[in-house]
Every structure is written in structure tokens, then in C-alpha cells.
Amino acid sequence: MISLVLVSVTSAFSQDVAMVGAGLLVLTLLGAWWRGMRQAARALAVFDYAANSLGLIACPHEATEETPPVPPRQPRRLFRWLRDAAIRPVRGRGNATAVRDLV
């Protein structure tokens, strides 16, 4: 962190230092990304090993032509519940008899 501050201060005086600092920062970030990808792959290998030892099987990556696509569900049940909630009496609100009376 201190080196980043020093590079930014000296870059005010020289653009060459700024370019070198930016290049080092990019290399550092790429190295961190590469290391993170390696660690994620190792963690995934641990989960795959655990799943295989439990006898689980992997799901196919792509849907086959045999299985039809699942149609999206319509939120009718939610709309029905909201409609009924607007009509239902509200308890403990004085003389208001429904939610629509409160609005």
C-alpha cells in the first residue's frame, strides 16, 4: 500500500514512473486473479471428491433434447394472496376494517 502511495506521489513528477507503477499494479492484480482461480479450482476438486465419495452423480452441463424445457411459473398464487390480503380485516388498528382502508 505504501508503495502505491509513493508511486502516485512520484508520478506527479515523472510519467515514466507512473507507467512503471501502473504496469506493476496490473501484473500484481493479474497474479492475484490467477492465484484465486487456482485456489477456486482446488476447492472445487475437494467438493467433487467429497460428492464422489458419497456416491453422488454430476448433473449434465447442457439440457438434452429428451428433456423438455420447464415453462416459467405464473405468479397467480402470489397475486391471489395479495388480493385476499387487501380484503382481509386488520386486527388492532382501531376501526379500520381492511388494508385498503388504511391507505
Image (cartoon, helix red, strand yellow):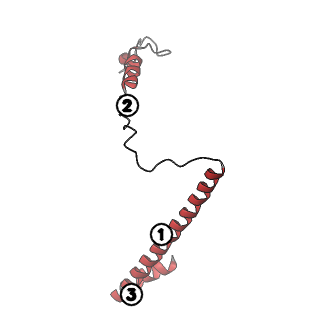
Q: Between 17 and 76, which is closer to the camera in this rendering?
A: 76
Circle 1 SS class: helix
Residue at image point 46% right, 13% down: 94
Q: Amino acid at mark 2?
A: Arg
Residue furthest to the left in view is 15
Q: Earlier in the sequence, mark 1 or mark 3?
A: 3
- Which x, y percent locates residue 76? 36, 24
Q: Nearer the viewer, mark 1 or mark 3?
A: 1
Q: Which residue is mark 2?
A: 73
Q: Amino acid at mark 1?
A: Trp
Q: Which residue is mark 3?
A: 17
Residue at image point 41% right, 21% down: 81
Write down the quadrant of residue 48 in the picture.
Answer: bottom right
Q: Which residue is mark 1?
A: 33
Q: Earlier in the sequence, mark 1 or mark 2?
A: 1
Cα distance, mark 3 to mark 2? 58 Å
Residue furthest to the right in view is 53
